[in-house]
Amino acid sequence: MQRNEIIVSASILASDFMRMGEEVQAVAASGTDWIHVDVMDGVFVPNLTLGFPFIEGIRKITTLPLDVHLMIVQPEKHIERFIEAGADILTVHCENNPNIHSTLLNIRKMGASPAIALNPGTPAEMVEPLLPFLDMVLVMTVNPGFGGQEFIPEMLEKMRKIRKWIDEKQLNVRIQVDGGINHETAGQCFAAGADTFVAGTSIFRNSNGYAAGIRELKNLC
Ligand code: DX5
Ligand code: ZN
């Protein structure tokens, strides 16, 4: 199995929104590789979060890659604005998206790194034909919408399947996991082929501090 270096992407959904700037700087100083930004529209998922001005603001205070996870309907309408706002990695969901292939091509053409996300109820097979057009597959390990949920272990099988296809096709595609990721579940995901770990609660609510939370995830291999 070809392995990429481990990446930790801190999900600011679990941070203190009233102190977002300080929180981003603190988690950057604590060793996160990427900043994960959850964009929710109240339609694709039953929750509302951050939009363009927040991303522009975060872009101004860190040089770390912004890993923007779009949980919105018709993401293709907003790709350009998210990239202009500062997104480096743009993840779109494959559910109910008949134009996903062209959306991915557009993301790359506009200068960002394209990734696709699968909800827990979405089969791995949805992503197989798209693998050559992607830099990363996000296997959701909870139902999207909220932080602090419990990891769904059945998703490990989905990671194994996708990892096998990536290796067989000799592609360089990351497998990211998001939802209920802590040092225990991250270890299981790593063994199943994941290399990119989104974590909110286990970093921002870690009783030993942000750096300890990030270190625990990084040390899993
Ligand atoms: C959930 C979001 C996640 C969330 C993860 O819909 O996509 O990024 O912040 O939170 P934790 O790590 O607390 O499960
Ligand atoms: Zn996310």
Image: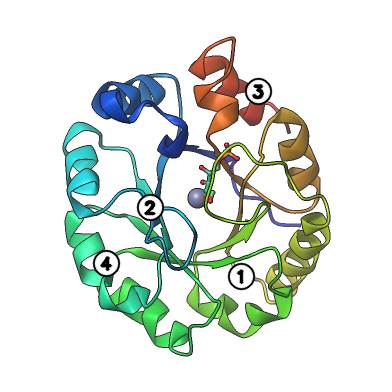
The answer to whether residue 134 is left or right of residue 208 is left
Cα distance between the residues tagged 4 and 3: 32 Å
First reached walking from the N terminus: tag 4 or tag 3: 4
Q: Secondary structure at mark 3?
A: helix
| Circle 2 or circle 3, nearest the eye | 2
List the single residue furthest toward the bottom. Answer: 98
Q: Secondary structure at mark 4?
A: loop
User: Could you tell me if the residues under marks 2 and 3 are in contact, i.e. CB atoms within 8 Å?
Assistant: no
At x 18%, y 40%, the residue is 57
| Circle 1 or circle 2, nearest the eye | 2
Give residue 78's position: percent from left, percent from top. 26, 71
Cα distance between the residues tagged 2 and 4: 27 Å
At x 40%, y 73%, the residue is 73
Q: Secondary structure at mark 2?
A: loop
Task: Give the total of numbered labels.
Answer: 4
Give residue 191's position: percent from left, percent from top. 80, 46
Instruction: Work out whether 188 lies above or below 22.
Output: below
Cα distance between the residues tagged 2 and 3: 30 Å
Residue hosting label 4:
111
Residue type at mark 4 is Gly
At x 44%, y 53%, the residue is 47
Residue type at mark 1 is Leu
| Circle 3 or circle 1, nearest the eye | 3
Residue hosting label 2:
48
Residue hosting label 3:
216
Label 4: how many Cα within 10 Å (few below 14, some 14–19, many 20+): some
For residue 171, the mark is: 1
| Circle 4 or circle 3, nearest the eye | 3
